[in-house]
Image: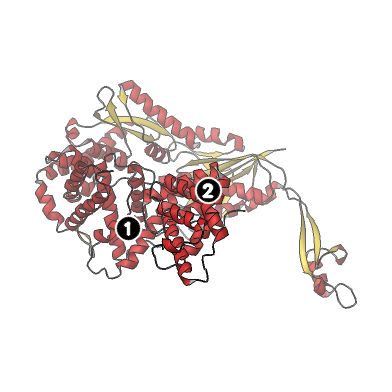
Amino acid sequence: MAKQYLLEVGLEEIPARFLLNLSQQLKERVENFLSEERIAFEAVNAYSTPRRLAVIVDGLSDRQSDLNERVKGPSLKVAKDDQGEWSKAAQGFARGQKASTDDLIIDGEYVYLDKHIEGLATKEVLTKIVDVVSQMTFPVAMHWSNVATPYIRPIHWIVSLLENEIVPFTFVGVDASNVTKGHRFLGNDATIIHPNEYVKQLKEQFVLVDFEERQAIIRKQIETIAEEHNWNVPINEDLLEEVTSIVEWPNAFYGEFEEEYLDVPESVLITAMRDHQRYFYALAKDTEKLLPVFISVRNGNADHIENVIKGNRKVLKARLEDALFFYREDLSHELSYYLDKLATVKEHVKIGSFSEKQARVEQGIKLVAKQLVPAQLETSDVAIAERAAQLYKFDLLTQTVGEFDELQGQMGQIYAEYYGESAEVAKAIGTQYLPVTSGGTLPDTKAGALLALVDKLDTLANYFNIKLIPTGSNDPHALRRKALGIVEIILDQAWDFDLLDILDAIVLQEESSEWSDLKEKLGNFIQARVQQHLEIDSIDHDIIQAVSNVEHLNVYYIVKSAHELQQFKQAQSSEYRAMVEAITRVVNLGAKVSKVEAIDLTILETESEKALVEKIEGLTSGSPKEVIQQLLDLVEVINAYFENNMVNADDEAIKRNRQATMKLLTIFVTEMVDPRELISKFD
């Protein structure tokens, strides 16, 4: 008969940011344990609160499945003596497997034993589930008391219950039982009758152990408050998840703060409430303006809620008072005050001041603009980006950003407009850090995209130049994220240019004798982020390698090439293969030719040779789709060429001429793709 099993590990409060991942890890470890132990089950359901990680296993079989396995023994040469009798080695093998030599089987060059292992009762096997608990891994762990084993937080109780029977084991001095604990202040200990009563019994002790149920209740409570007051309360999903992870018995409430604090920019108030206090904020439904109210969630019931509101108001008031003071203090200075101070603050001791960084970025914008104007960028956008670059780091020296560092850039936008800069310049400053995550929001103006791009390029180039290069998982300056941001900005704007062309000019040239080598490393570093992007787009690995193995770093062209090749491969597989095979023959020969020479038309011998040279002379650079079509048109000509001509001819002049032909065509092909990475992928 199918059974239920409950495992609960009770701890001191787990940090909110780790709870869901640890809950999922426990679930997966239990699933793997049961599978490895040959115990059938229907489902493993995870439960979690700040003080507990739990799973309930449904449909658990009574016993392990039996195991039939063939155990390999010694080689036949060793297993038999000269008289053909079983040797001591064979006898020892049989004895070690609790069998006799009569059970030995000869199969080929070795002897074996067929063993039948009868499954144990599930309860007996589950005593080993202590290994699941002990092998959990944590981003941080702690020691406590005299316990030698570190854990995420001290363990206070463990429940291990199969149907209504305790499955005994001991971990860190805690014996598994059927007794759990309720809410820290509202509940009591509870003896779990059966796993299917677990959720209900904990609810009686003021614990909502189901994370999704708890989250849904919090959402509903907040929505009810909003409806009752005709407010619009944006529910930030990350904040909702965090709040759900810190309460066991949620009770949402609201409080008010003084309207004078609304003089502070909304982004500051929202950050103070949401990020620093874990409060939700409210907007007026008709105007969408921020209201002087906050919504929070108590871990408890509604008793004495007025005292809770009063305490929260006091804490928030102190933080908003600071914010108002910092804001007013910031505005008491002129913009020139901050710009002058930028010259005294170093981005890094080996790189220089933020004032110098602004100058480099302004110059970098001009360099990028030369490649993009007028076809891909308006001069007006460049002018906006250049003006923004002259001052875009000034907000780092404001007191508001000193207190709320997550608002850097945003405060720059607000203050820039206050100081009389255009809305376009201010917007570019406000989006300089975007995207902050992979796939995140990107700058929504061309000037902003240009500033954000060059800012990240400057950081990468100069950190590489002083050899602060990420290694392994160590990336304290978030250079990988910045490189991926460069890729995403270029693709979003469809900017068609080679990054390598501007890296030399952007980098600080002092003490950069090794820049050539570092430039190559930086190019490879950005190229790796391009490959990461293509992997997310489900491009075949060989195509990713083929488009990456080129001499340029035109991100847009590389990504476009990968997508066009992938589409061509899927839509016209036979034509794709024919093209790849033909151009690979060319590149295999052309790559070995070191010198680029002009083709001598006077010594072309065959019609097929003349036809290929004529085609080469007609090739034009273009989009990847256009290049693929030109290469496709070359397939028959290339094949005819190789059928009728030997590249390495006996005549030296003809040989060099044909090598020149291969070299010129190779240069054209490898501007888009290295087909040698593709040819090995055919069956």
Q: Residue shown at 90%/77% (left/top)?
A: 83
Q: Is residue 662 above or below residue 630?
A: below
Residue 466 location (% of width, % of height) = 29, 66
Q: Amino acid at mark 1?
A: Leu
Q: Residues within 10 Å of mark 2 (few under 14, many from 20)?
A: some
Q: Residues within 10 Å of mark 1 (few under 14, many from 20)?
A: some
Is disc 1 placed on a helix, strand or loop? helix
* Extreme residue in the right direction: 83
- Check whether the beta carbons of the residues at disc 2 and disc 1 lie within 8 A of each other: no
Report the side of 92 relative to 263 (left or right). Answer: right
Q: Quadrant of the N terminus?
A: top right
Instruction: Tell me which numbered mark, 2 or 1, is placed earlier along the sequence.
Output: 2
Q: Which mark is residue 500?
A: 1
Residue 326 location (% of width, % of height) = 16, 44
Q: Residue shown at 33%/21% (left/top)?
A: 228
Q: Quadrant of residue 428?
A: top left
Can residue 658 be spotted in the picture? yes
- Residue named by callout 2: 25
Nearer to the camera, 516 or 674: 674
Q: Is residue 366 above or below residue 258?
A: below
Can residue 14 be spotted in the picture? no
Nearer to the camera, 114 or 440: 440
Q: Amino acid at mark 2?
A: Gln
| 2 vs 1, front mark | 1
Q: Residue shown at 41%/39% (left/top)?
A: 241
Report the side of 434 relative to 95 (left or right). Answer: left
Residue 347 location (% of width, % of height) = 22, 58
Q: Quadrant of residue 252?
A: top left
Report the side of 683 relative to 428 (left or right). Answer: right
